Each structure stands twice: as C-alpha cells, then as structure tokens.
Image (spheres, rainbow, N blue to C red):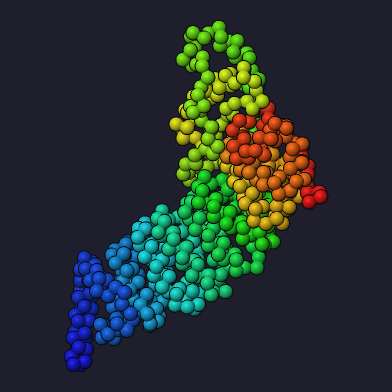
C-alpha cells in the first residue's frame, strides 16, 4: 500500500516538473497558485512526502526562474509566496541551503530596494528573508554580509505601505537578536532611518531603537541630533515614540547633552514678535477715536456690542494636521492672540474683543490656506513637554534641568503668544517644578507679576489664554539666573 502511494506521488511530481519545464508564463502562474492553495502551512516532512522526496527539485526551478524574472516582476508575488511555504515549513533546513546556493538572498534584497517593485512583493520578500533569518545566527550573518541591513533599512524608509514598513522593522529586530557581529550595524541602520520623510517609519525605528538601546552599554551620540530633528514633527505618534526613547536614554552617558539640547530649544533663535503685539495693544485708544468717526461706514467690520464668549476661539492647543517632515520647515504660523486683558478694566474689555475679532477674521484666511506653525515653535512645545515628563519620572533629572538654567527658558516659552501650545507645555513643566521645589516657586514668583503668578498657580493649563502682550513681554525678557542653589 505504501509502495503504491509512493508511486502515485512520484508520478504526480514527475508530471508537475514536466509541465513546469514546458509551460508558458500563465501556465506557471496557475501551477504556483495551485501549489500555494494546496500546501499552505505544510511542514517540511509533509512536503517531502507529497513530493516523493523530490520537493527540492521544484524549489530549484522556482529559484532559477525568480533569478531570471525578479527585475521584470513576472509572477513575482506567486513565486515569493511559494518560497515562503518552503522556507517557513518546520524542519526546512535543506530548503534553506538550496535557496542560499541559488543566490536567493541577493535577489530578495534587490526586490526590497527596487523602485519598480510592488509593495506586496516587497512585503513577501521581507517575509521570506525573515524565514531565512529565523534559521539561526549563521543565516542572519549571511544576510548581513550581503548588505542586507542597508537594503532592509532603505526599504523601511522609502516604502509607502505601513505593512511593508512593519515587516522591515520586524526583520531588522530579528537580525539584531542573537547576532553579536552585526547587532551594532542594525542599531546604526535604524538610526539612519530617522531622517526619512515617513512618520510611520520614524515611529517604528524609534520603537526598535528603544528596544535595542536597553540591551546596550552605551548610546550613539548621533541620536541627539536625530531626536532634535524629530521634535519638529507634527505627528503625535512620532513625538510619543521620541519621549519613550528619551526615557530610556536618561540612563546613558548622553543624558546631560540631551537635556541641555532640550533646554536650548525652549529659546529658539527665531525672535518672538512681541513688539508688534504690544504696539497693537497700546494703540487701542487711537483706534477707537478713528473708528468712532466712521462707525456707520464700518459697522459690519466693527460690531458695537461685545462678542459673546462662545464665539471666541480660545482653544489652548492648535489642531495639529498631518504633515510630512519634508514640508515642516517651509510652513508658516497661525498667530493665536490673547482674548481678554487680564489686568484691563471694563472699558478696555470691549476694545480688546473688537481687536480680537479683527485678528480672528485675518486668522481664518490663514487656516483656510493650510498654514502650519513654525517648526522652531513646534520644537519648543515638544521640548517643554519632554522636560516635564522626564522631570516627573526622576527627581534627579528635575534637579539637573534646574541647575542647567531651564527656568529662564521655560518662562521665555510661556511668553510665546505666537504659539499657544508652547505656552501650555512650558506652563505645565514650570508648574510641576514650582510645586515640587518651593525655592523654585519663589524665584518664579519674583520673575512674574503677582497677578500673573496667582493665575499661573491656580490654572497652569489655561491661564495663558488671557495673557496680555505686556505680561508676555515680562516673561520673555526675564533675567532669571537660578541654577538650583539650596535644592
């Protein structure tokens, strides 16, 4: 009975191989589809039994054909799926050797970096390479020796499919695990992905770097510049991944340099345009005299009654729309002007509301044009948020940033009327330091006006909404030089 079954299997395999050798492209595609449907999720012994111990002959034919056709993409998806069946099967070491002897690794790497290859083909090529890497350290080293790390990292950075990017990330992590010869190259390859234009690739690379970093004794100093660059991103998932990586890096030798870089970002070289805002705020009386003589003609533009509070836009954080990293530096800022003077009398409240109404009309056109905040202000807000979270994680870190002079720069960021998120994040960071260290609160109280300090302590996450240009000027012009004496 066993002999009869063996004879049938031998006949079927012989017939299949004969068909393959004399078939056209479409017929071979059909043969591959039938093979994929019939033997999906089979083990190595099952394949050998079904193919009468001649499965390697069919694998060899696929390997030869893929070498001839991978550049043109002929039946590439089907061939890659068939290879995946062979190499993912249990006890498939003989198939791995057969695949390597035919130079399959180089072909798959070419598919990964080919600009003409389809995303689905790149994804299957990465899956097949993962099967090879799972074979053990020897196979991981073989991939790495063929410049596989660079090819996979390039695929991850340039791919337009999130599934492909995730497959590339998974393969890089496999190559780093249990591969001491090339784990450092994988680590550097992931760092090289960070400047790319894909937020998803940046997020995945940051997550993988965090995993690898925890197993290392030192940190690469190139991470400092990369992290500063990524803080420009308007994608919250990227900034969240940056924060998680920073938490890990606080235990390494570059922690102080990172903290100093974050503190420096709080006071960017771009000057906050408070002078113009202050001039406009102090010229309300002249505006009223001019507008009163032309009230009838300008009635539509300048309403005679105060604008209801519900109609004013006083949102604390501007909506962050998705934007690629390549467009971040060329964008403009939508200025968020204060709504009400905190120290003003009732006679000036209506004038401030009228003035704010004019700014809102101007701002609506800017939002319609799709303008975005300046990248330095996005960095400023992100840096303040990072410092707050890192301070909350560790009292040692909070003392360090105070000794590095962070108070003056946080006050400066709080006065940035041009970007409300900077004000909010700096306010929250400063409030935590004031609440934790009474000496810091005394220094901050002296730097602010009494009214502003009272509002700041009472509502740290919203007091900036009513900040006047004069109050902002006090914050921006602060001369605080406290470096943690007495803490």
Q: Give the percent coordinates (x, y) of residue 169.
A: 47, 63
Residue 246 or residue 232, whichever sits in front: 246
58, above or below 247, in the image: below
Nearer to us in this view, 15 or 224? 224
Looking at the image, can residue 43 be seen?
A: yes
Is the residue 99 above or below the residue 440 in the image? below
Query: From the viewer's perspective, is 191 left or right of 91?
Result: right
Query: Which residue is painted at 77% across and 45% down in the image?
Result: 439
Q: Quadrant of residue 220?
A: bottom right
Horizontally, residue 132 falls left or right of residue 221, namely left
The residue under the point 63% across, 40% down is 460
Of residues 295 and 17, the one drawn nearer to the viewer in this rendering: 295
The reply to whether residue 222 is visible in this rendering is: no
Quadrant of residue 375 within the rendered picture: top right
Residue located farthest toward the right when viewing the structure as drawn: 486
In the current view of this chain or complex, which residue is farthest to the top?
Answer: 293
x and y percentages locating residue 365 in the rendered image: 47, 28
- Is residue 25 found left or right of 151 in the rendered image? left
At x 60% / y 69%, what residue is drawn?
215
Q: Position of residue 109 (x, y in %)?
A: 43, 66
Location of residue 161 in the rendering, given as x and y in whole percent from the top left corner:
40, 55
Assign the N terminus to one quadrant of the image.
bottom left
Residue at 20% across, 88% down: 5
């Amino acid at each position: 009975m066993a002999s009869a079954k063996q004879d049938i299997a031998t006949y079927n395999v012989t017939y299949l191989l004969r068909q393959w050798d004399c078939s056209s492209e479409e017929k071979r595609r059909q043969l591959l589809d039938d093979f994929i449907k019939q033997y999906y999720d089979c083990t190595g012994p099952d394949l050998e039994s079904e193919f009468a111990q001649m499965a390697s002959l069919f694998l060899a034919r696929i390997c030869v054909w893929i070498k001839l056709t991978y550049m043109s993409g002929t039946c590439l998806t089907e061939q890659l799926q068939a290879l995946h069946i062979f190499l993912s099967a249990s006890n498939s070491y003989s198939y791995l050797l057969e695949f390597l002897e035919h130079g399959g690794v180089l072909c798959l790497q070419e598919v990964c970096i080919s600009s003409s290859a389809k995303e689905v083909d790149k994804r299957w090529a990465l899956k097949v390479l993962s099967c090879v890497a799972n074979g053990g350290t020897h196979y991981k080293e073989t991939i790495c020796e063929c410049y596989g790390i660079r090819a996979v990292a390039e695929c991850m950075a340039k791919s337009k499919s999130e599934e492909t990017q995730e497959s590339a990330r998974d393969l890089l992590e496999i190559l780093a695990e249990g591969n001491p010869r090339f784990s450092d190259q994988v680590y550097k390859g992931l760092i090289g992905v960070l400047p790319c234009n894909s937020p998803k690739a940046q997020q995945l690379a940051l997550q993988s770097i965090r995993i690898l970093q925890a197993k290392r004794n030192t940190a690469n100093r190139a991470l400092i510049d990369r992290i500063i660059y990524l803080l420009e991103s308007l994608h919250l998932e990227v900034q969240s991944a940056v924060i998680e990586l920073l938490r890990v890096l606080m235990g390494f030798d570059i922690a102080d340099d990172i903290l100093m870089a974050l503190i420096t970002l709080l006071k960017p070289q771009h000057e906050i345009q408070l002078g113009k805002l202050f001039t406009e705020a102090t010229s309300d009386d002249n505006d009223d005299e001019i507008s009163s003589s032309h009230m009838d003609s300008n009635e539509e533009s300048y309403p005679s009654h105060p604008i209801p509070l519900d109609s004013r836009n006083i949102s604390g954080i501007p909506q962050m729309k998705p934007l690629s990293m390549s467009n971040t530096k060329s964008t403009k800022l939508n200025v968020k002007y204060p709504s009400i003077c905190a120290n003003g009398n009732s006679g000036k409240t209506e004038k401030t509301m009228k003035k704010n109404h004019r700014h809102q009309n101007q701002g609506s056109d800017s939002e319609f044009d799709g303008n975005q905040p300046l990248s330095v202000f996005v960095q400023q807000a992100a840096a303040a948020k990072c410092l707050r979270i890192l301070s909350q994680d560790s009292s040692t870190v909070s003392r360090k940033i105070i000794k590095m002079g962070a108070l003056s720069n946080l006050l400066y960021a709080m006065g940035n009327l041009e970007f409300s998120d900077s004000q909010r994040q700096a306010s929250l960071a400063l409030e935590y330091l004031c609440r934790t260290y009474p000496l810091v609160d005394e220094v901050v109280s002296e730097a602010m006006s009494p009214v502003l300090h009272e509002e700041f302590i009472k509502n740290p996450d919203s007091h900036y909404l009513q900040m006047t240009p004069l109050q902002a000027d006090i914050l921006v012009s602060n001369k605080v030089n406290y470096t943690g004496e007495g803490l």
